[in-house]
Image: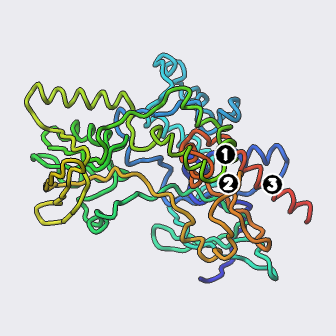
Amino acid sequence: MSHQLAIEHDVIGVGFGPSNLSLAIALDECARRSRLKCTSLFVEKQSQFTWHGGMLLPGSDMQISFLKDLVSLRDPTSPFTFVNYLHKHGRLQDFINCRTFYPSRLEFNDYLRWVAAQFKPHAAYGETIVAVEPVMAGQSVTSLRVYSRTLAGGETVRLAKNLVVAAGGRPNIPEVLAKTVDDARVFHSSRYLDTVDSVGLGGKAACVAVIGGGQSAVEVTVDLRSRFPHASIDLIFRGHALKPSDSSPFVNEIFNPDYTDFIFAQPGERRDAIVRNFRNTNYAVVDSDLLDQLYRLLYQQRISGTTGVELHPRSEIKSVRAAVEGIEIGTVDKFSGQHRRSCYDAVILATGYDRETPHTFLEPIRRYIRDTAVDRNYKLATSPAFRPQIHLQGYSESSHGLSDTLLSVLATRSQEIAESLLSTISRRELIA
């Protein structure tokens, strides 16, 4: 790649979702307190700030308290709290009257966008990071050359003294469905609202398959029933039954920031056991209220004698074939051995996300990265000749616990990373 004249930043963030948005606040706060200058820029592939835009379904609520916003657990007096957002929009009293800890997902997205708008000078939207190359001074890597590509195909190059990767997860596509995922009739739930109205499900008795047994799968199923009342919807999942998430107060303590210290201090085998033990708080589980809603929907079908929604538990997908008439899916009941074959007008994959690291854009500096695991401050271990810090947000569940991919630790994690980055900037200023 060509080495253009590039602007240098103390920190470049890959992605500008909640994690790096929280970091933008923390960097600003830390820099003000320490009286250090810290230039930061966050590169986001979306054309504007949107948080899970494809799943901002009508009536869907947060599954986490509004107090676990971008800053409150670190500094409840910050101007960037959800409470201050409500105050600024003249809705604080009305929200109190709603008597809930759980705002709608639409409102929380609006809160995040409100904060993001205040950091617009620090964001570059509509760009995807494609490569990160070392900048050498003798035998040492002193900074990073960061290449991004715009939606129009243009290239931008910048310099970064440090890098923070928080690009989120990639949609997880089961191997059996990989060959048909390019078919417009097969799409991941992350694109649900952007796609569902374009696949021709209205005005006819369409058949839709929803694959998955977690929160998104049930949310999509209920929304489809409301959006297309004449459609037949099959919810296909591997478990025996749809399970409720465990959000009881004692179990919820695993999402407390100090629990991260406990998890990180454990040997690897014990960490894995703890994460497995608490998977029912976050994976392949459904909010109890939503389960009740789905059960009542199914019960009303029994009363009326209709079959709009059908559940297919214990189902293993064995074959998928795209044909002109539809997407044909063959399943087998894992216990009875009974085979089933059905044809669908659309298949929606509520199959979660893949958060494997490191990213391909780090390939040019791979030889300097000693281990893909991070330290307690979410920093990659690099060789002594490599001066930049590379921090990861949202890729350390195995070392830092289940809260790592959730909103629960945003406020404290961003503070830890900001302090780590500012200490490097401080040392450089002293040397200079």
Q: Nearer the viewer, residue 275 or 57?
A: 275
Q: Nearer the viewer, residue 166 or 54?
A: 166
Q: Position of residue 274 (x, y in %)?
A: 56, 43
Residue 6's tag is: none
Q: Which residue is mark 2?
A: 378
Other residues around mark 1 within 10 Å, as few (<14) / some (14–19) / many (≥20): many
Q: How is the image coloured?
A: rainbow
Label 1 and label 2: CA atoms lie apart by 8 Å
Seen in the picture, residue 340 relative to 239 is either above or below; the reply is: below
Q: Which residue is mark 1?
A: 413
Q: Position of residue 251 (x, y in %)?
A: 54, 31
Give the left or right position of residue 158, taking residue 116 as reference.
Answer: right
| Residue type indicated by callout 1 | Arg
Q: Nearer the viewer, residue 429 or 392?
A: 392
Instruction: State how many labels appear.
Output: 3
Label 3 element class: loop
Give the left or right position of residue 127, taking residue 234 as reference.
Answer: right
Other residues around mark 3 within 10 Å, as few (<14) / some (14–19) / many (≥20): some
Label 1 element class: helix
Seen in the picture, residue 222 relative to 20 is either above or below; the reply is: above
Give the left or right position of residue 22, taking residue 309 as reference.
Answer: right
Give the left or right position of residue 146, taking residue 184 as reference.
Answer: right
Among the 4 quarters of the image, the one containing residue 411: top right
Q: Nearer the viewer, mark 1 or mark 3?
A: 1
Residue sitting at x 40%, y 51%: 352
Q: Which residue is mark 3?
A: 37
The residue at the far top in this view is 97
